[in-house]
Each structure stands twice: as C-alpha cells, then as structure tokens.
Amino acid sequence: MYLHETFLRAIELDRSRVPDFDRYPFNLAAVRELGKLELHPKVTYIIGENGMGKSTLMESIAVAWGFNPEGGTKNFTFSTEATHSNLHEFIRLIRGVRKARDGFFFRAESYYNLATSIEEMDRDPLGGSSIISSYGGKSLHEQSHGESFFATFIHRFGGQGLYILDEPEAALSPLRQMSMLARIHQLVGRDSQFIIATHSPILMAYPDSIMYEMTPEGIQTTTLEETDHYAIMKRFLNDKERMLKELFED
C-alpha cells in the first residue's frame, strides 16, 4: 500500500480462532468487524466515540508487540491490576523489514502507575543507572500531569521506534497538543512510526497519515474534516452562542 519501509505493516484478527463474537472483547465495534488493518509507515490514527473499543484494540497491538499492558517500554513488567483482555492472543502482527531500536506504549489512564514504577525501580540500589534520567531527570510525580506527559514525549522518545499512544492529549492544553504534533513530526523525521488513539482534532491533523474510525457498524477510513470531532469543535468555535442555546434547551 505504501512505498516507505515500516516497522509494523498491518495487524490482522485471526477470526477463525475467535471463540464467540458475542463475548467481550470480540463483541466490541472495533473488534467485531476487524479483518486486516493496514498501517501507515508514519502515523496511523484510531478514532471513534467512547465504548467503541479503541483502547482495547490499542492495548492488544501493544501487548502483541511486547509492551507492558499498562504502558512503558518492553523492559517494564509492573502490574497494578491485571485488567487487560486476551485480544492480543488473536492478533497477528505483520512486521516490516526494519527493526525498531526504540518503542513505547503510552497509556494516559495508567500513566500514574508508570511514573510510580519508575520511582520504585530507581530506589533499588541494584537497579543500575537512574531510569528517570531518560525522562528529563525530574520526578514525574513532582510535575503537573501535562508536564510529566510531555517530558516523556520529549526526553524518552528517541526516534527509530514504534510509539503506540492511547489518548496522549488527556492532560495537554491545546498549545501543548500543537507542540506534541511538532514532536511527532520530529520523530517521524527520525524514522519513527506512530499509532495514535485520540479525540483531539489538533493531534489528528498530521498530514502524512491514515485515519480509521471505529463505529457501531465497524471500521472505516476517514479524514480529519469528515470526523464529528472536527465538525463539532468547528461549529462550537464559529457559533458558540447558538450551540450553547441548543445544549441548554435540550
């Protein structure tokens, strides 16, 4: 599909092995109609409303790649609560010829647990060099949520890697989201590949990308301008008073 080489070319659900499509996680919209999903060598977006199964799908890709279900690199093994699904056991990764030198699974909902794990490992006198130095040298718990998120993007992501991001905008201001978009562009220039689940029209704006929308009917390709995220935000900004009137009347 694409001329560029990539780390991960596609994912595929082995539908013949699925025990029951009426049972979780196979009954989720993002999974139920999943066949083979081609990935862009630079940026692939997974979008859709809450409850469509985006995070479950992202988690399965990350775990199948070898990442910890709660986030981090392949070297993280912490687990605060084993709540991840077994979807990764049914996902086949179609890899490219290149080998990634770096990688990270960023999961906003469990980022606090990741930060805590880093501090615990750094307190271990046998743990070798400081882990937090790779995240800017300052405790992630001593920064605001947004600052600690951004510290990971800036300091830990080094390039030539596969980065799987689940709702990275959760603690970022609009300005920080634009800075994040610039950071993504920098890392793409360093031969990196991104898979991003997001609700942010700003983060969805990377031009050299493909966007998949999860709907109750299944998965479809779309563009930023065609998404409800973009249309609703544009309408609100262009006609705030009328939209507020409609919302409050309802």
Image (cartoon, rainbow, N blue to C red):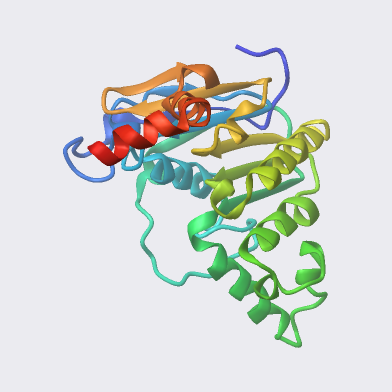
Q: Quadrant of residue 28?
A: top left
Above or below, 97 against 89 in this view is above
Above or below, 42 against 108 in this view is above
- Residue 195 location in percent, x, y? 58, 36
Above or below, 136 against 211 in this view is below
Above or below, 1 against 158 in this view is above
Residue under the image location 77 percent in, 45 percent down = 101
Q: Left or right? Give the position of 87 relative to 226.
A: left
Can residue 203 be seen from the camera position used here? yes
Can residue 95 be seen from the camera position used here? no
Residue under the image location 31 percent in, 42 percent down = 51
Q: Left or right? Give the position of 61 relative to 85.
A: right
**35, 144: nearer the viewer:** 144
- Residue 90 location in percent, x, y? 37, 39
Quadrant occupied by the C terminus: top left
Residue under the image location 38 percent in, 65 percent down = 82
